[in-house]
Amino acid sequence: MMKARTPVLIVSALIVSQLILSTTTATANNRALIAPLEIGTLHARSATRLSSVSFPVGTSSKSSPSGLAPPPINAMTGFHLTYVNNFNGTKLPVGWDVFTGIPGGAPGGQFGSAHVQVGGGLLRLNTWRDPRYQNRWVTGGLCQCGLTRIYGAYFVRSRVTGGGANEVQLLWPANNTWPPEIDFNENGGNLNATSSTVHWGSRNFAVRRVLAIDMTKWHTWGVVWTHSKIDFVVDGHVWTSITQPAAITRIPMRLDLEQRTICSEHRQCPTTPVSMLVDWIAEYAPG
């Protein structure tokens, strides 16, 4: 979820069972990366070995909207469960705050508090034309502002109902000073792909990687952030990782879930109402 134009290194990939990876390099404003990440082809070769499930996916449950309930306490070796919520109530849980106003970096966008709902065992972020905002496409967004940490593992069981709006799951600095930022599931309005992006440094260096996947189906998205590596996970598989020391933030971060539109620029704009559906969230801390 970029706040400004930035040099980006892009790695495109298919999911673990069908890995076909390639790399391209892009720069903005004719600026090259000062310290390019040592990834790309080297990483693509190693990624083909990531075939086993190594991180939590969930536990089978007929009563869960997604078919999987949150993973157990001991699901991660070397980590312990610190937070879990399956949104079984009708109100937003304590520790979460809904966004209002204009999203940063999204010209013409608008958050609305009524666009975040809890019910039927789901957290729903909803985008629709809202007459309270001149019939613009208004989106839902919220943060787990009541819980921040340095290092941890976050898992979000979710799917989207349609395309157009940019659906984002990310870690954001607790002090609201950007960068850093860790986007672990950002689809850019697409239904057949998502991406991860890590932003860091005063000049906003970034590395972005793309995963081809059906976003309308239920998936367990994860990010495992340690002092030496950031793993990006889908359905228990690590699909890409960051190991560049400068890219790994070491300040408190929080979990944000957002939808965004840029309809004023005729992109990331839906044509029908769309939602991000979240069945549950589980978080682990090292130790």
Image: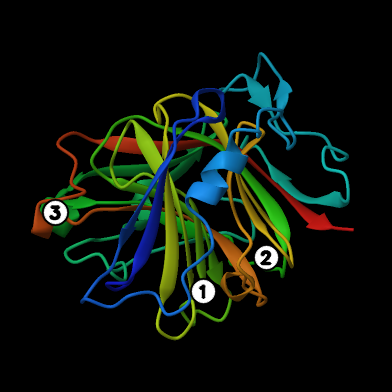
Q: Is residue 66 left or right of residue 211?
A: right
Q: Which of marks 1 and 2 is in front?
A: 1
Q: Where is residue 203 in the image (x, y as percent from the top left)?
A: 40, 83
Corner quadrant of residue 162: top left
For image coordinates 57% across by 71% down, the residue present is 247
In this view of the protein, which residue sits in the foreground, 10 or 139?
A: 10
Q: Nearer the viewer, residue 105 or 53?
A: 53
Q: In which quarter of the image is residue 235?
A: top right
SS at circle 2: loop
Question: Residue 109 appears in which quarter of the rendering?
Answer: bottom left
The foreground one among 228 and 46 is 46
Q: Which disc is residue 147 wearing?
A: 2
Instruction: Determine the secondary structure under disc 3.
Output: helix
Q: Which of marks 1 and 3 is in front?
A: 1
Residue 205's spot in the image, x, y percent? 43, 74
Q: What residue type is labelled 3?
A: Cys
The residue where tag 3 is placed is 263
Mark 2–mark 3 CB contact (< 8 Å) = no
* Amino acid at circle 1: Pro
**Vertical order, 221 against 130 (above or below):** above
- Indicate which disc residue 180 carries: 1
Q: In this view of the protein, can residue 265 be seen by the observer? A: yes
Q: Is residue 1 visible?
A: no
Disc 1 is placed on an element classified as loop
Pick the quarter of the image with the N terminus: bottom left
Mark-to-mark CA distance, 1 and 2: 17 Å
